[in-house]
Amino acid sequence: MNRSIGIHDIEIGTTHHVVDLADLAVARGVDPDKFRIGLGQDQMSFPAPDEDIVTMGAAAARALLARTGADGVRTLLFATESGIDQSKSAAVFAHGLLGLGADVRAVELKQACYAGTAALQMALGIVARNPAEHVLIIAADVARYALDSAGEPTQGAASVAMLVSADPALLEIDPVSGVFTADVDDFWRPNDSSTALVDGKLSMSAYIDALLGAWDDLQARGGVTAADIAAFAYHQPFTKMAAKAQRRLAAHLGAELADDDLVAMSTYNRRLGNSYTASLYVALAALIDARADLDGRRVGLFSYGSGSVGELLTARVLPQGGREDRSARVSRMLDARAPLPIAEYERLHALSYPSGTDTETPRTTTGPFRFAGIRGGARQYEHIG
Ligand code: COA
């Protein structure tokens, strides 16, 4: 008999600061409705100087492990495209901050926004091989584009921590998925650039190609059909992209797909902004937190990473408690962020800490971990509480 394997628990983290997109619109001389309605975004999280993917990711994982414990965790996978080192993985920094044992392997994965799903697939394989093992996944990113560029209002930052196990409490992942890979120059970040280069319109059409291609592959491999899927969650570079995707998928299927899941799925992303690898799993959490009626039913999850790889997974939502708790925690976290005036956001956007100079970062974050600075070329992290 195939054992049930999937996501046992999920937790979201973000940054100390937030930028209101209405303020950004005024500063850029743009109608605020372009961002609010045209892109479907209200706010974007922004890191303090002593925050990065490691501090955000470890904070979400710490909150998750406080509930689940770390027993059985044998692997930590860290998905990101905002890497802080070309060699040492963000996973090893997080492993240290979380106090995991030396017998827990740690590695970082990259393929633009798709890497969180690559981590999930790897985790499912590890657990299928030994159901006693658990895998801790962290997906964390800071989405950065140049100031005053078309991509600027689609920045953001967030992390997701997920525990993958046999007999999960939250979501049972179906064994068959659909995959679509194509070599496209729609979005990339060269090694010498702190901001991404993007052909925005090409990335939107490449996203749709990947969605439809992954759907067709799912069907060709005997995956579940549209009639079995009660709602979809999508990767959301901006939430309007999910509405466009759902419309195109419905036309491809020749079926109606209800829009009420789009609203539910977008509530956290609208306020966090793009979080690259974390974005789809933030959407998944928002969807299941808002929709108790999905218990026992199937959802479709579409993951897209520019460059490009797309994957369509399906999963059964398990009847569970705790959704109100997570929803309240996320709301509290989002409300607690410190608003950044645009001039201060622009100053922080330009800030960088070159590895050749020893530096101490200003103490700003109120999260449990902070990036303390650079010593001898190496990044230093510390616990706050
Ligand atoms: N009120 C309401 N909507 C408005 C508006 C207003 N005053 N002004 C413009 N809009 C709408 C446009 O009609 C458009 O909607 P549509 O796509 O449904 O037609 C939307 O706002 C965006 O406007 P557009 O002119 O296309 O935006 P842009 O060229 O400035 O940039 C992106 C949009 C997404 C291309 C850009 O933000 C980007 O490059 N982002 C990063 C890449 C990315 O996220 N890619 C996604 C796939 S991974």
Image (tube, rainbow, N blue to C red):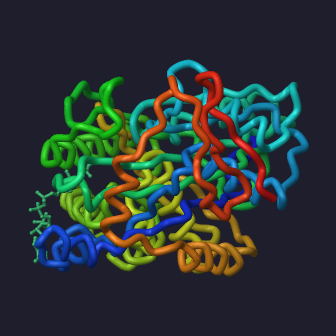
Q: Quadrant of residue 155?
A: bottom left
Is 282 placed above or below 324 here? Answer: above
Residue 277, image x and y in percent? 47, 45
Residue 180, image x and y in percent? 33, 33
Residue 1, image x and y in percent? 76, 39
Residue 196, image x and y in percent? 29, 39
Q: Quadrant of residue 72?
A: top right
266 sits left or right of 84 in the view: left
Name the one closer to the observer, 92 or 125: 92
121 sits left or right of 81 in the view: right
Name the one closer to the observer, 286 or 347: 347
Residue that appears at 67% across and 81% down: 324
Residue that appears at 20% across and 30% down: 185
Residue that appears at 11% across and 72% down: 29
Q: Is residue 121 visible?
A: no
Quarter of the rendered image showing ligand 1:
bottom left
Residue that appears at 60% across and 33% down: 374
Q: Is residue 333 visible?
A: yes
